[in-house]
Amino acid sequence: MSEILEEKKNVSEKVTDIIRNKWFKFGVVLFFYLLWDLWVGSWYLLLLVPVIFDIYITKKVHWAFWKKKGAAKQTKTVEWIDALIFAVVAATLIRLFFFEAYTIPTSSMEKSMLVGDYLFVSKVAYGPKLPNTPLSIPFTHNTLPFTASTKAYSELISNPYKRIGGLSEIQRNDIMVFNFPTGDTIIVGNENPDYYSQIRSNARAHRQIELSRGNVISEQQARQQIRSQIWRKFDVISRPVDKRENYIKRVVGMPGDMLVLKNGELYVNDVKSEIHKGLQHDYIVKTNGTQMNKKKLKEDVGISYEDMGMVSSSDYVLPLTEEMVEKVRKYTNVKEVTRFVSGGYNPDIFPFDAQYQWNVDNFGPLYVPKKGSKVELNLLTLPLYERIIGVYEGNELNVKDSLIYINGERADSYTFTMDYYWMMGDNRHRSADSRYWGFVPEDHVVGKASFVWLSLDKEESFLHKIRWSRMFQFISAE
């Protein structure tokens, strides 16, 4: 028996010696580092292999400069610094390559995602996007905390778009997080609506004022004058793709799709889109003259106080799912529930051109560009794809004498170099989505909404704030 115990002890000591061996440690670390390098696909990372070799084998350089070299025991301060550096590096890598925490600030995705939902977004689902601006302060996005314009990143190093391997492809109806496409230019302190929307709306008003004074100016002249005024009055800054604000919407249009909205109903490739459980539209609710019980509406139907709009003393505008409509109809003082449908031309709707008399409920047909596909270019189709050609895909675009020139050459067609997506919020009448700013390029995709770990109702107090039924729930595309 003692011989067996002695043999086991010897084996255990040999295993311990192997694990403690510097060459074994070096081999294990190198193996996983090379796997990670293969995933990232950057041969420049191989330049760090000599550093790993020196850390474990030669030990010529004192890499942990905050530690006292050769000390048998480090002070508590050094131990805390050591732990802090490890935590920052580990958390940064997790946020970059695996998942990141977000919160839902607006009602644009209700009732699928609620205001106050705290969720994890999977970066590895579609493949992590390597940062365009890798030099940034850890745990910040685009500005330093408690400041509106102080950048938390440096553009000394600017990388082109690259996405590494993921677990899946983007699917129709996925709830996706992405960098706001028209967030490349920001009016500091006046970010909403976006810069381009403010230019357009203010230019329309300015043009009307000038016309009333007898001054005839073109739309282009009006926009140029408003642009100059904004730049004189405000601090205007630009942001790279990965430092633009993060938005969350549902993917309703995939590359190559043809989309049409008819009276609020979405058709994709001539097929009516499925109705999601959380899909909401605005409804006009007429009562018999008595007001509705707001507390009951919130508790029984699920409408937040913030969303309870009144048309008159007895008529309401409420965002409702089909299930919620049936509940409201059962109220004894409700006479009629009618879905609201927008009519007429809305100049704030993409592509912001009177040739397309579209609005939030009647829209299209519109082709969603697919990488390698070609579209005909003329003065009618140009407004649809102008931003893609000139901004997202970096071409020099000009129109002279009604002729289109791309990079100095006459063009009557264009072939796309990236895939694009069309995003819409499930709260259809209360969502600033692709209908207001256009396509989402593939290089703006951040990740897939995967898991709600906490949900807080800001309209409740203390423990009632917590929506217990939503905690630790996986996010479904249904």
Image: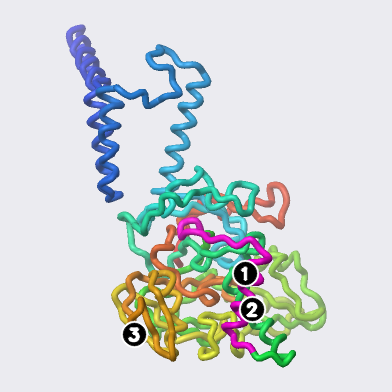
Q: Magenta part of the protein: which range?
A: 217-244
Mark 3 secondary-structure assignment: strand
> What residue would you read off at disc 3?
410
Q: Earlier in the sequence, mark 3 or mark 1?
A: 1
Judged left or right of residue 185, residue 295 is right
- Nearer the N terminus, badge 2 or badge 1? 1
Question: Is 260 situated left or right of 219 in this image?
Answer: left
Mark 3 or mark 1, which is nearer to you? 3
Provide the residue designation for mark 2. 201
Say which residue appears at 59% left-offset and 50% top-offset. 150
Q: Is residue 96 above or below residue 194?
A: above
Q: Amino acid at mark 2?
A: Ser
Question: Which residue type does callout 3 highlight?
Answer: Arg
Pointers 2 and 1 in contact (CB under 8 A)? yes
Q: Residue at x 55, y 75 (%)?
A: 436
Give the distance between the C-alpha atoms of the residues marked 2 and 1, in whole angstroms: 10 Å
Mark 3 burial class by Cα count in 10 Å: few <14, some 14-19, many 20+: few
**Camera sees residue 300:** no
User: Label 1, on which residue?
Assistant: 193
**Badge 2: residue crowd in 10 Å (few <14, some 14–19, many ≥20):** some
Say if residue 354 shows up in the picture. Answer: yes
Q: Are marks 3 and 1 in contact (CB under 8 Å)?
A: no
Query: Is residue 286 a member of the stretch shown in magenta?
Result: no
